[in-house]
Amino acid sequence: MLEVVYLMYNEGYSATSGGNWIRPTLCQEALRLGRMLAEAVQGEPEVHGLVALMEIQSSRFKTRIGPSGEPVLLMDQNRALWDRLLIRRGLAALERARSLGRPLGPYALQAAIAACHAQAKAPGDTDWARIAALYEALSRVAPSPVVELNRAVAIAMAFGPAIGLRIVDELNDEPALRDYYLLPSVRGDLLAKLGRMEEARAAFERAASMTQNVPEQELMRRRAAECAERQ
């Protein structure tokens, strides 16, 4: 049941196709169902972990899209506009998950990662080393190539893009990521940070060709064009 609610939330948070990047109504319905589950099964830490994750992620909705509906990435969002009430609710739910005295599961660990972002007043205040450690813990309880890709991003932010790129390149042959546009997107970002603009441009163009979501396609093409201008 938790997986279904989370899949519903994710489809609203980052739509897989269509002309809208986010579908807030779908996220709100998933969050409503999650809150109901938390009331019904109060002794299950992962229920509270999932609610915490959805509450914190939902706090960013006002800042995730620009005036024309274009995606605004996490590091570019205006954190003053994040919904502090939802963040407080999320942190409280995460504390309830922790208070039950069992090891944190996948949802609670993801909520802890989201909490690191929510508690950083500015992008430069983000504790990327802690986020990398949380992704390491997540990879042990719920290993997947997507988790490893996210861990690579955190490691790159904490210890430098060259280290993160080595991890990303090891994922190139993962069957589960063959059609996952965020793999070349992350690779493009790291290559750009290393000044390898031609390779970065190609990676962003590949990412644009792999997503069915129009705003994501436009974002990837815009990033590819920026790399071309910087060559």
Image: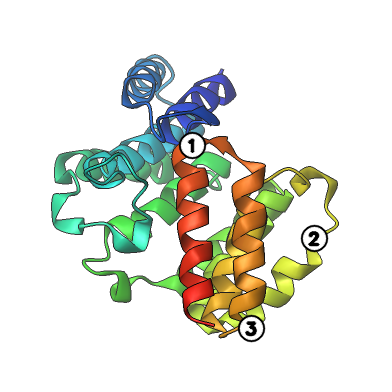
Q: Quadrant of the N terminus?
A: top right
Please tell me which of labels 3 and 2 falls first in the chain.
3
Q: Which residue is mark 3?
A: 162
Question: Closest to the observer: 162 or 97?
Answer: 162
Q: Position of residue 10 (x, y in %)?
A: 49, 32
Please tell me which of labels 3 and 1 falls first in the chain.
3
Q: Quadrant of the C terminus?
A: bottom right
Q: Does 144 appear above or below 12? A: below
Mark 3 near mark 2, Cβ–Cβ under 8 Å? no
Camera-side mark, 3 or 1: 1
Residue at figure coordinates x 27%, y 39% from the top left: 61
Q: Amino acid under label 2?
A: Asn
Residue at figure coordinates x 49%, y 36% from the top left: 214
Q: Which residue is mark 2?
A: 172
Q: Does 222 appear above or below 123? A: above
Q: Which residue is mark 1?
A: 214
